[in-house]
Amino acid sequence: MADEPLYSLIASQMEELIASGRWSEGDRLPAERQLCGDFGVSRATLRQALGELEERGLITRHQGRGTFVTQPRLQLPIVGVFSIRDAMEAYGMKMSTRVVRVEVIEASRQLASDLVCLPGEKVVFIERLRLSDGEPMVLDTAHLRAELFPGLESVDLENRSLYDVLERDYGRTVAEAQETLEPVILTPRECELLEVPTHTTALLTRRITTDDHGVVVALGHVLLRGDRSRYLYKRTVETAAVRAATRDEAAHHPATEDAPPGGTP
Protein backbone atom coordinates (compact mmCIF):
# COMPACT_ATOMS: atom_id res chain seq x y z
CA MET A 1 0.00 0.00 0.00
CA ALA A 2 1.44 3.36 -1.08
CA ASP A 3 2.25 5.92 1.60
CA GLU A 4 -0.38 8.63 2.04
CA PRO A 5 0.74 11.95 0.50
CA LEU A 6 1.95 14.57 2.97
CA TYR A 7 -0.74 17.05 1.97
CA SER A 8 -3.42 14.43 2.69
CA LEU A 9 -1.94 13.81 6.16
CA ILE A 10 -1.98 17.56 6.85
CA ALA A 11 -5.59 17.75 5.63
CA SER A 12 -6.54 14.96 8.04
CA GLN A 13 -4.86 16.78 10.93
CA MET A 14 -6.76 19.94 10.05
CA GLU A 15 -9.99 17.98 9.85
CA GLU A 16 -9.36 16.71 13.38
CA LEU A 17 -8.99 20.30 14.58
CA ILE A 18 -12.37 21.09 13.04
CA ALA A 19 -14.00 17.96 14.47
CA SER A 20 -12.61 18.72 17.94
CA GLY A 21 -14.06 22.24 17.91
CA ARG A 22 -10.68 23.95 17.95
CA TRP A 23 -11.71 25.47 14.63
CA SER A 24 -15.47 26.03 14.66
CA GLU A 25 -17.98 26.79 11.94
CA GLY A 26 -17.48 30.37 10.74
CA ASP A 27 -13.93 30.68 12.11
CA ARG A 28 -11.28 32.11 9.82
CA LEU A 29 -8.19 29.93 9.61
CA PRO A 30 -4.79 31.45 10.41
CA ALA A 31 -2.80 32.95 7.56
CA GLU A 32 -0.98 30.56 5.24
CA ARG A 33 2.43 31.60 6.58
CA GLN A 34 1.39 30.70 10.12
CA LEU A 35 -0.17 27.41 9.03
CA CYS A 36 3.02 26.49 7.15
CA GLY A 37 4.99 27.08 10.33
CA ASP A 38 2.50 25.24 12.54
CA PHE A 39 2.52 22.12 10.36
CA GLY A 40 6.10 22.38 9.13
CA VAL A 41 5.24 22.20 5.42
CA SER A 42 5.79 24.29 2.32
CA ARG A 43 3.14 26.65 0.98
CA ALA A 44 2.56 24.35 -2.00
CA THR A 45 1.84 21.38 0.29
CA LEU A 46 -0.41 23.49 2.49
CA ARG A 47 -2.44 24.68 -0.47
CA GLN A 48 -2.92 21.09 -1.61
CA ALA A 49 -4.17 20.23 1.89
CA LEU A 50 -6.55 23.19 1.87
CA GLY A 51 -7.78 22.13 -1.55
CA GLU A 52 -8.61 18.68 -0.20
CA LEU A 53 -10.50 20.19 2.75
CA GLU A 54 -12.42 22.41 0.35
CA GLU A 55 -13.30 19.40 -1.79
CA ARG A 56 -14.66 17.69 1.32
CA GLY A 57 -16.81 20.74 1.98
CA LEU A 58 -15.11 21.60 5.29
CA ILE A 59 -13.77 25.02 4.34
CA THR A 60 -14.39 27.80 1.85
CA ARG A 61 -11.73 30.14 0.48
CA HIS A 62 -12.55 33.75 -0.37
CA GLN A 63 -10.13 35.90 -2.32
CA GLY A 64 -8.93 38.77 -0.15
CA ARG A 65 -10.90 37.61 2.91
CA GLY A 66 -9.29 34.33 3.91
CA THR A 67 -10.28 30.73 4.52
CA PHE A 68 -13.30 29.88 6.69
CA VAL A 69 -14.65 26.73 8.33
CA THR A 70 -18.03 25.65 6.96
CA GLN A 71 -20.60 23.08 7.94
CA PRO A 72 -19.57 19.69 6.55
CA ARG A 73 -21.50 18.68 3.44
CA LEU A 74 -22.65 15.21 2.56
CA GLN A 75 -20.77 14.36 -0.63
CA LEU A 76 -22.32 11.69 -2.82
CA PRO A 77 -20.78 10.02 -5.88
CA ILE A 78 -22.48 10.37 -9.25
CA VAL A 79 -21.48 6.84 -10.25
CA GLY A 80 -22.41 3.59 -8.53
CA VAL A 81 -25.46 2.36 -6.65
CA PHE A 82 -25.39 3.27 -2.97
CA SER A 83 -27.71 3.67 -0.01
CA ILE A 84 -28.02 7.02 1.73
CA ARG A 85 -27.36 5.34 5.08
CA ASP A 86 -24.09 3.81 3.84
CA ALA A 87 -23.01 7.07 2.20
CA MET A 88 -23.58 9.14 5.34
CA GLU A 89 -21.83 6.64 7.59
CA ALA A 90 -18.89 6.40 5.18
CA TYR A 91 -18.60 10.18 5.36
CA GLY A 92 -18.23 10.01 9.14
CA MET A 93 -21.65 11.45 9.98
CA LYS A 94 -23.46 10.28 13.10
CA MET A 95 -26.49 9.20 11.17
CA SER A 96 -29.99 8.27 12.29
CA THR A 97 -33.24 7.57 10.48
CA ARG A 98 -36.76 8.64 11.34
CA VAL A 99 -39.63 6.89 9.53
CA VAL A 100 -42.22 9.54 8.69
CA ARG A 101 -44.79 7.38 6.94
CA VAL A 102 -45.27 3.82 5.68
CA GLU A 103 -48.45 2.75 3.94
CA VAL A 104 -49.80 0.51 1.21
CA ILE A 105 -51.32 2.43 -1.69
CA GLU A 106 -52.64 1.68 -5.17
CA ALA A 107 -50.37 2.35 -8.13
CA SER A 108 -51.37 5.23 -10.39
CA ARG A 109 -50.84 4.87 -14.12
CA GLN A 110 -47.53 6.73 -13.95
CA LEU A 111 -46.32 4.80 -10.91
CA ALA A 112 -47.34 1.53 -12.52
CA SER A 113 -45.37 2.49 -15.63
CA ASP A 114 -42.27 3.23 -13.54
CA LEU A 115 -42.52 0.00 -11.51
CA VAL A 116 -43.57 -2.10 -14.52
CA CYS A 117 -46.77 -3.29 -12.90
CA LEU A 118 -50.51 -2.85 -13.41
CA PRO A 119 -52.41 0.30 -12.42
CA GLY A 120 -54.18 -0.31 -9.13
CA GLU A 121 -51.61 -2.87 -7.95
CA LYS A 122 -50.67 -2.61 -4.28
CA VAL A 123 -47.49 -0.61 -3.65
CA VAL A 124 -45.61 0.00 -0.39
CA PHE A 125 -44.86 3.70 0.11
CA ILE A 126 -42.03 4.59 2.52
CA GLU A 127 -41.03 8.10 3.60
CA ARG A 128 -37.96 8.61 5.81
CA LEU A 129 -35.85 11.44 7.18
CA ARG A 130 -32.09 11.02 7.44
CA LEU A 131 -30.45 13.03 10.21
CA SER A 132 -26.85 13.87 11.08
CA ASP A 133 -26.35 14.55 14.79
CA GLY A 134 -30.11 15.11 15.03
CA GLU A 135 -30.22 17.61 12.15
CA PRO A 136 -32.42 16.64 9.16
CA MET A 137 -30.29 16.29 6.03
CA VAL A 138 -32.20 14.10 3.59
CA LEU A 139 -35.84 13.30 2.91
CA ASP A 140 -36.27 10.18 0.84
CA THR A 141 -39.27 8.25 -0.37
CA ALA A 142 -39.53 4.83 -1.98
CA HIS A 143 -42.27 2.94 -3.80
CA LEU A 144 -42.01 -0.85 -4.01
CA ARG A 145 -44.41 -3.50 -5.30
CA ALA A 146 -46.15 -5.16 -2.35
CA GLU A 147 -46.40 -8.41 -4.33
CA LEU A 148 -42.60 -8.66 -4.48
CA PHE A 149 -42.05 -7.64 -0.86
CA PRO A 150 -44.88 -8.94 1.33
CA GLY A 151 -44.78 -7.57 4.87
CA LEU A 152 -42.25 -4.84 4.02
CA GLU A 153 -44.43 -2.24 5.70
CA SER A 154 -43.76 -3.98 9.05
CA VAL A 155 -39.95 -4.15 8.75
CA ASP A 156 -37.74 -1.95 10.94
CA LEU A 157 -36.47 0.66 8.49
CA GLU A 158 -35.07 3.02 11.09
CA ASN A 159 -32.13 0.79 11.92
CA ARG A 160 -31.59 -1.03 8.62
CA SER A 161 -30.74 -0.02 5.07
CA LEU A 162 -33.58 -0.64 2.64
CA TYR A 163 -31.17 -2.28 0.18
CA ASP A 164 -29.96 -4.56 2.98
CA VAL A 165 -33.56 -5.54 3.74
CA LEU A 166 -34.27 -6.30 0.08
CA GLU A 167 -31.21 -8.53 -0.18
CA ARG A 168 -31.27 -10.31 3.18
CA ASP A 169 -35.02 -10.65 3.70
CA TYR A 170 -36.26 -11.00 0.13
CA GLY A 171 -33.28 -12.26 -1.87
CA ARG A 172 -33.26 -9.23 -4.19
CA THR A 173 -29.78 -7.87 -4.86
CA VAL A 174 -29.76 -4.28 -6.11
CA ALA A 175 -27.58 -4.15 -9.20
CA GLU A 176 -28.38 -1.05 -11.22
CA ALA A 177 -30.07 2.32 -10.93
CA GLN A 178 -31.17 4.87 -13.50
CA GLU A 179 -31.13 8.36 -12.03
CA THR A 180 -31.99 11.92 -12.88
CA LEU A 181 -30.74 14.85 -10.83
CA GLU A 182 -32.22 18.35 -10.69
CA PRO A 183 -32.49 21.35 -8.36
CA VAL A 184 -35.97 21.99 -6.93
CA ILE A 185 -37.74 24.34 -4.54
CA LEU A 186 -39.00 22.47 -1.48
CA THR A 187 -42.70 22.44 -0.71
CA PRO A 188 -43.85 23.93 2.62
CA ARG A 189 -44.28 20.41 4.05
CA GLU A 190 -40.80 19.36 2.92
CA CYS A 191 -39.32 22.53 4.44
CA GLU A 192 -41.04 21.73 7.72
CA LEU A 193 -39.70 18.16 7.77
CA LEU A 194 -36.17 19.26 6.87
CA GLU A 195 -36.38 22.23 9.28
CA VAL A 196 -35.32 24.81 6.70
CA PRO A 197 -36.84 28.17 5.66
CA THR A 198 -39.57 28.26 3.03
CA HIS A 199 -38.49 28.36 -0.61
CA THR A 200 -35.24 26.55 0.22
CA THR A 201 -33.59 24.76 -2.71
CA ALA A 202 -32.70 21.08 -2.68
CA LEU A 203 -31.17 18.47 -4.95
CA LEU A 204 -33.74 15.94 -6.13
CA THR A 205 -32.57 12.53 -7.28
CA ARG A 206 -35.18 10.36 -8.97
CA ARG A 207 -33.99 6.75 -9.05
CA ILE A 208 -35.41 3.60 -10.65
CA THR A 209 -33.59 0.60 -9.20
CA THR A 210 -33.37 -2.88 -10.71
CA ASP A 211 -32.07 -6.14 -9.28
CA ASP A 212 -29.50 -8.53 -10.73
CA HIS A 213 -32.21 -10.14 -12.88
CA GLY A 214 -33.25 -6.84 -14.44
CA VAL A 215 -36.50 -6.59 -12.45
CA VAL A 216 -37.51 -3.10 -11.30
CA VAL A 217 -37.62 -3.24 -7.50
CA ALA A 218 -38.05 0.39 -6.43
CA LEU A 219 -38.80 3.93 -7.47
CA GLY A 220 -37.11 6.43 -5.18
CA HIS A 221 -37.06 10.19 -4.72
CA VAL A 222 -34.24 11.62 -2.61
CA LEU A 223 -34.26 15.25 -1.52
CA LEU A 224 -30.91 16.51 -0.24
CA ARG A 225 -30.61 19.91 1.38
CA GLY A 226 -28.73 22.14 -1.04
CA ASP A 227 -26.83 23.84 1.77
CA ARG A 228 -25.58 20.58 3.29
CA SER A 229 -24.91 18.25 0.37
CA ARG A 230 -23.40 17.97 -3.06
CA TYR A 231 -22.65 15.38 -5.71
CA LEU A 232 -19.13 14.55 -6.81
CA TYR A 233 -18.53 13.63 -10.43
CA LYS A 234 -15.02 12.68 -11.50
CA ARG A 235 -14.00 12.30 -15.12
CA THR A 236 -10.81 11.01 -16.66
CA VAL A 237 -9.53 13.22 -19.46
CA GLU A 238 -8.13 11.31 -22.39
CA THR A 239 -4.80 12.84 -23.38
CA ALA A 240 -3.65 13.39 -26.95
CA ALA A 241 -1.09 10.60 -26.51
CA VAL A 242 -3.79 8.13 -25.46
CA ARG A 243 -6.00 9.14 -28.38
CA ALA A 244 -3.07 8.72 -30.79
CA ALA A 245 -2.27 5.28 -29.34
CA THR A 246 -5.90 4.24 -29.75
CA ARG A 247 -5.87 5.34 -33.40
CA ASP A 248 -2.61 3.47 -34.03
CA GLU A 249 -4.04 0.33 -32.43
CA ALA A 250 -7.12 0.54 -34.66
CA ALA A 251 -4.95 1.08 -37.76
CA HIS A 252 -2.80 -1.96 -37.02
CA HIS A 253 -5.78 -4.19 -36.19
CA PRO A 254 -8.58 -3.22 -38.57
CA ALA A 255 -11.92 -4.94 -38.35
CA THR A 256 -12.02 -7.94 -40.69
CA GLU A 257 -14.76 -9.96 -42.26
CA ASP A 258 -15.43 -13.54 -41.23
CA ALA A 259 -12.50 -15.87 -41.96
CA PRO A 260 -12.89 -18.11 -45.03
CA PRO A 261 -13.72 -21.79 -44.54
CA GLY A 262 -10.78 -23.63 -43.04
CA GLY A 263 -9.27 -20.44 -41.66
CA THR A 264 -8.83 -19.46 -38.04
CA PRO A 265 -12.21 -18.48 -36.50
Image (cartoon, rainbow, N blue to C red):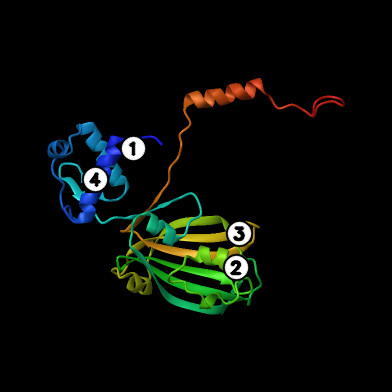
On screen, residue 180 versus residue 68, left or right, reads right
Reading the image, the residue beneath label 2 is 170
The span from disc 3 to disc 2 (Cα, nearest Å) is: 11 Å
Q: What is the residue that sits farthest to the front in this orientation? A: 1
Crowding at dot 1, Cα within 10 Å, few <14 / some 14-19 / many 20+, comes out as few
Q: Secondary structure at mark 4?
A: helix
Q: Residue at x 53, y 67 (%)?
A: 165
Nearer-N-terminus badge (4/1): 1
Residue 148 in which image quadrant: bottom right
Q: Quadrant of the C terminus?
A: top right
| Residue 2 seen anywhere in this rendered image of the structure | yes
| Residue 126, horizontal then vertical, whole percent | 49, 73
Q: Secondary structure at mark 1?
A: loop
Residue at label 4?
Answer: 13
Q: Which residue is mark 3?
A: 211
Q: Residue at x 39, y 34 (%)?
A: 2
Position of 242 compared to 203: left or right?
right
Q: Earlier in the sequence, mark 2 or mark 1?
A: 1
Instruction: Name the residue that disc number 1 marks.
Output: 4
What type is the residue that disc 3 sits on?
Asp
| Residue 83 position (above or below residue 29) | below
Going by the numbered disc 1, the residue's amino acid type is Glu
State the CA–CA distance, disc 1 to disc 3.
Answer: 37 Å
Q: Are marks 4 and 1 in contact (CB under 8 Å)?
A: no
Q: Nearer the viewer, mark 3 or mark 2?
A: 2
- Closer to us: 207 or 187: 207
